[in-house]
Image (cartoon, rainbow, N blue to C red):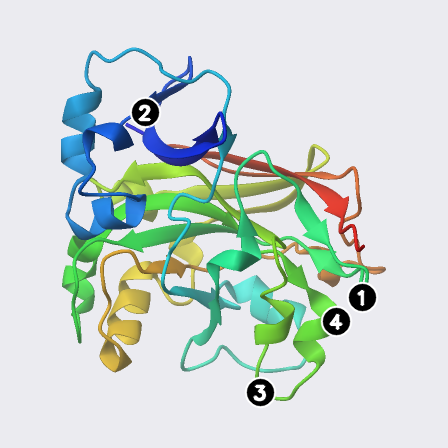
């Protein structure tokens, strides 16, 4: 079962996604106005039950990010061995994972364009798996970490590369340009460790494979990410962790291969789906 947030006929909905279209479920759950409240209530099974036997309500709609009002999005940086080598700074594998925040305003939904700002044209792609926390916890043991995941989705963690170099100790300003990245298309309930442990992530730009790796090669596996993050903050339902991107981002080519209007980026993981976005220039009045 796949669940998405979307807009149809000018109104917001969430619901189940089928090959024929969307089944609106939000009208059935007025106590849960957005997908965030669904996750906080542990409501995905209830949505799945109501969706059984329902017919499609919307065949034309626009995907939004699955949790449009996600309160906290944490990203793990440089989490594949080859990614560390890409930096060519001679550094060994780090002892601790790199983390930075992103905000929901920096993302758009599946099928919508990423926006390249006029101030800088170094817009880059990063294909990643994102996990949605469904059960709160502090100091979560790694062996119990998967118990705290409600759902999975995909992320294009789009980055304005020049702006991550503006300061010595942070990358926040290069990671949060409006609609520079994407999350989606939908949430897939997490029910089996194999959904993550055996996952292969592939990123294509205009049909060309740029990234291709398996999550089992992460330097900091997702269980460890949850354990580490929950050491210093209580993870809460609706929190999103973007887990890390493989080698092959555009900045690491010589010369760099940044995104431009007309490009199409596809990020695919079997069992989760395919996130597809075009690129457009921001229109400044």
Say which mark, if any, is on residue 169.
3
Q: Nearer the viewer, mark 3 or mark 2?
A: 2
Q: Provide residue 150's location: percent of width, then percent of height.
A: 23, 48
| Of callouts 3 and 2, the N-terminal one | 2
The residue wearing badge 2 is: 24
**Marks 2 and 1, how far apart in space?**
39 Å
| Other-residue count near label 3 (Cα within 10 Å), few / some / many at <14 / 14–19 / ≥20 | few
Q: Quadrant of the N terminus?
A: top left
C-alpha separation, residue under disc 3 versus residue under disc 4: 14 Å
Residue at the disc numbered 1: 119
The location of residue 3, given as percent across then percent down, is: 33, 33
Question: Between marks 1 and 4, how big is the CA–CA gap?
Answer: 10 Å
Q: Percent x, y for residue 108? A: 55, 47
The picture quadrant where one finds residue 169 is: bottom right
The answer to whether residue 14 is left or right of residue 38 is: right
Determine the CA span between mark 4 and mark 2: 41 Å
In the structure shown, which secondary structural element does the residue marked by tag 4 occupy?
A: helix
The residue that disc 4 covers is 162
């Amino acid at each position: 079962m796949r669940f998405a947030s979307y807009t149809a006929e000018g109104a917001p909905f969430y619901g189940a996604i089928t090959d024929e279209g969307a089944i609106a479920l939000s009208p059935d759950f007025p106590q849960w106005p957005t997908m965030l409240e669904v996750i906080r209530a542990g409501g995905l099974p209830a949505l799945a039950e109501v969706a059984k036997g329902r017919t499609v309500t919307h065949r034309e709609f626009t995907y939004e990010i699955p949790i449009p009002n996600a309160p906290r999005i944490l990203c793990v940086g440089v989490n594949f061995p080859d990614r560390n080598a890409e930096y060519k700074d001679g550094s060994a594998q780090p002892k601790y994972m790199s983390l930075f925040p992103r905000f929901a305003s920096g993302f758009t939904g599946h099928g919508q364009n990423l926006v390249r700002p006029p101030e800088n044209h170094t817009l880059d792609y990063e294909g990643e798996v994102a996990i949605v926390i469904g059960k709160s916890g502090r100091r979560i043991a790694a062996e119990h970490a998967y118990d705290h995941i409600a759902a999975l989705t995909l992320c294009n963690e789009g980055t304005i590369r020049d702006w991550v170099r503006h300061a010595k100790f942070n990358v926040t300003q290069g990671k949060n340009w409006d609609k520079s990245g994407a999350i989606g298309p939908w949430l897939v309930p997490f029910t089996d460790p194999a959904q993550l442990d055996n996952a292969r992530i592939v990123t294509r730009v205009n049909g060309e494979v740029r990234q291709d790796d398996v999550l089992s090669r992460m330097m900091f596996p997702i269980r460890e990410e949850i354990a580490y993050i929950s050491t210093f903050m209580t993870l809460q339902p609706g929190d999103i962790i973007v887990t890390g991107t493989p080698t092959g981002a555009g900045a690491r080519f010589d010369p760099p291969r940044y995104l431009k209007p007309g490009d199409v980026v596809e990020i695919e993981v079997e069992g989760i789906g395919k996130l597809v976005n075009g690129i457009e220039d921001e229109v400044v009045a």
